[in-house]
Amino acid sequence: MKRNLIFIIAGILSCQVLYGQPSFSELRERDKSLNEGITYISEGQYELAAVSFTHCLDLDSTYAPAWLMRGRIFIEWGVMDDALEELNMALHYNSALGEAFFYKGYVLFGTDSTGEDRQLFDRAISSGYEDTWAYYFRALTEIRDGMDEQAINDLNRAIELKDDFALAYHERAGIRRRRGDLQGSHFDYQRSVSSDPDFALAYNNMGSVKILMGDYAGAIKDYSRALELDPELLVALNNRGYARFFTEDREGALQDFNAAITSGAQLSQVKLNKASLLAEQGQMVPALALLDETLQEYPDEALLYLNRGLVRELTGDLGGACEDWHMAIELGAEEANEFIKECDR
């Protein structure tokens, strides 16, 4: 009796396991639904895609690609907590699914402070997910964490995989600029805007490189193009005003600074630039008033103290100037050490 009982139970368990597996026809329907859902995603029809992927999981709840794709839909909808749950399910059923590691890293990118996002991009790539975006986003985490050499390598790989990858050229240009390679940076910004002619920020940043190269007229053209593409890019207004100042176009510079300020640009630099222009024109009282106002908004900006000190010195207020330069040094503006010597005389 005991032997028969064990045999019967084992047989029942075996039947249950077999019963839980999808049939061949169900597997065909599952795969068909997955492909339909992917097509819907490519068309932007996310609701229909979700229905298709849910049908896949009704047929086979262990089907990792369907969990992955449904996670992607939640990302599109901005429901990141649900997306993480779906991606974790995908990885539960397939721990080598590189694409799921990538999208999980993507969800955490920008909010994670532990470095887990980069580890997930590592896992994605090591699992064979040779995708331009995986290398690009890993590069962004490396830039964030001061790993410029590794970031360059990843951006190079992203560009190898996609020769017209405007974002990758843009980020590589930024690293080259920080390293003092202005020619290389300018080349990358050019490639970026040729790959994406509507990339306003790339035009702005290319203009900034041209300023460093002394090409103020070229910089003005780039800033103007950036503003044509994105009138809300107020930093380009400030930068164009700065470039115009160096081409002796004082009126144009003042117009740009005023336009940026009127538009509500939250930039201490634009008010500092306007104050410098006013002081250069001998308008010390409005220059000081603007610097005072700006320091109320940005009390920890070292350059504001440095420049207010210079204006105060020009008005004969050496004591006030020295106070500002001491504060500038305290806040990290080493340039003020050169001016502080005036206070010992």
Image: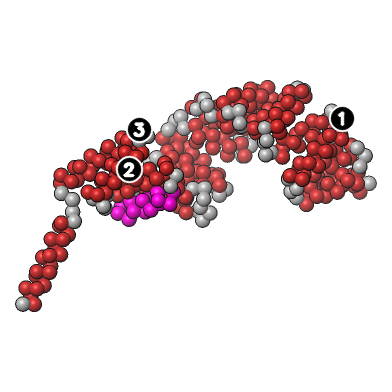
Q: Which residue is mark 1?
A: 282
Total number of numbered labels? 3
- Residue type, mark 2 in image: Ala
Residue 122 position, x and y percent, is 43, 49
Q: Nearer the viewer, mark 1 or mark 2?
A: 2
**Looking at the picture, which amino acid does disc 1 mark?**
Gly
User: Quick check: 16 left or right of 52?
Assistant: left
Q: Earlier in the sequence, mark 1 or mark 2?
A: 2
CA gap between label 1 and label 2 equals 66 Å
- Could you give the CA–CA distance between mark 3 and mark 1, rounded to whole angstroms? 61 Å
* Label 3 secondary element: loop
Look at the numbered disc 2 and give the secondary structure of its residue.
Answer: helix
Residue 139 seen in the current view: yes
Pair 3/1: label in front:
3
Q: Which residue is mark 3?
A: 43
Q: Position of residue 152 (x, y in %)?
A: 52, 40
Q: In the rendered structure, does residue 92 fall within the stretch colored magenta? A: yes
Would you name the residue on which mark 2 appears? 50
Q: Position of residue 246 (x, y in %)?
A: 75, 26
Q: Taking 172 as reference, is 1 above or below it?
A: below
User: Which stretch is magenta?
Assistant: 80-95
Q: Is residue 334 visible?
A: no
Q: On residue 266, which mark appears?
A: none
SS at mark 1 in the image: loop
Q: What secondary structure is the magenta-colored segment mainly?
A: helix
Q: Is residue 291 left or right of residue 192?
A: right
Q: Quadrant of the N terminus?
A: bottom left
Residue at x 87% of width, y 44% of height: 321
Residue located 45% across and 52% down the image: 119
Q: Within 10 Å of the Cα at label 2, are there few (<14), some (14-19), or many (20+) other Cα atoms?
A: many
